Amino acid sequence: MAKGTHQLEWCIVRLGDDHNWWVDEVSDPVHWDVDGLSIIDPRQVDHIIELIEPLREYGFDSNLFERAFIPFRITKDLGKGRVRLARTKQPLLESEEKLFALPDIIDEENGPYADFLDHITRLRVKLLNDLLDFEEKLTIDEVEDQLREAQNNDFIEGKAVHLFQEITAILDFMPAGHGDDEEESDKGAAEDEEDDLPEVEEGEEEKLKGDASLKWDDDEDEDADAEGKDGDDKDKDKDEDDDSDDEEEEDDKPSRSKRGRG
């Protein structure tokens, strides 16, 4: 582990607008620069451990993982999205407590965190070469070049790259033309097929609606029921009108009789 890390005993972290945690203050400002320093929260730690699981059969080294991170536990909620953390000796892979993990990046090139990234990159390449049928074997250099290009694009756009994203970019890495790219391609092809369907003009659409040959049996039954209902309603209205006329005639008869007698 880098020489000054034993002096880092506590830190204060805040929840950013991106829903990631970032370091505001540390007990060792001499060795640690908090400008843009991110820390991995317990939920993200669990997700990383889950993504690492398939790499175990390819020789994953748990010790490299433990050395790459400094574990912290929550000691105080400071309010307004700020929390005070204290360093702990509990191992991340075995602890039942929800722990934060600060990647040890004091030596970014040759430190334990850099070793961890190299390790999982090699194992991810082995896994992909086993799972996917490449014309030529995928190489570590190819993967690192693609990851570096994505990071440079984020840097140009002014995006702050959280270290959790840096790790999952490796553990989720899939070369172009595989995985999600294929799903997007299939989705695009389906949309193209829909676009190729001829549009039905409004007049033609009305003709199609009235075409009995295009109706399902259920539709015909519903139409028949509707017609029968309409007929019954008309007969009912007619009967009511006849009854009304009869009542008027009955009313007129006594009236005329009275006038005749007068």
Image (cartoon, rainbow, N blue to C red):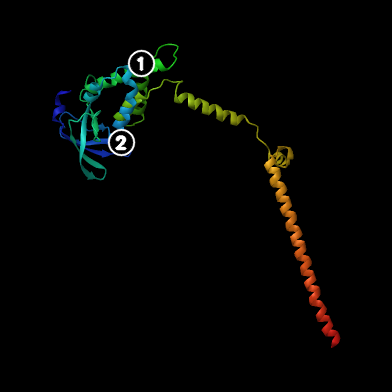
At x 30%, y 31%, the residue is: 46
Q: Quadrant of residue 26?
A: top left
What secondary structure is found at the residue carrying circle 2? loop
Looking at the image, residue 224 lies above or below residue 67: below
Mark 2 residue type:
Asn
At x 50%, y 25%, the residue is: 185
Q: Quadrant of the N terminus?
A: top left
Q: Is residue 108 visible?
A: no
Please state the total of marks drawn on the protein image: 2
Q: Quadrant of the C terminus?
A: bottom right
Query: Dot 1, crowdedness within 10 Å: few (<14), some or many (≥20)?
Result: some
Looking at the image, residue 45 lies above or below residue 130: below
At x 75%, y 65%, the residue is: 240
Residue 181 horizontal side relative to residue 166, left or right: right
Residue 168 horizontal side relative to residue 86, left or right: right
**47 or 37: which is nearer to us?**
47
**Residue 254 % position (x, y):** 81, 80
The numbered dot on residue 20 is 2
- Whether tag 2 and tag 1 are in contact, CB under 8 A, the answer is no
**14 or 152: which is nearer to us?**
14
The numbered dot on residue 29 is none
According to the picture, the residue beneath numbered tag 1 turns out to be: 126
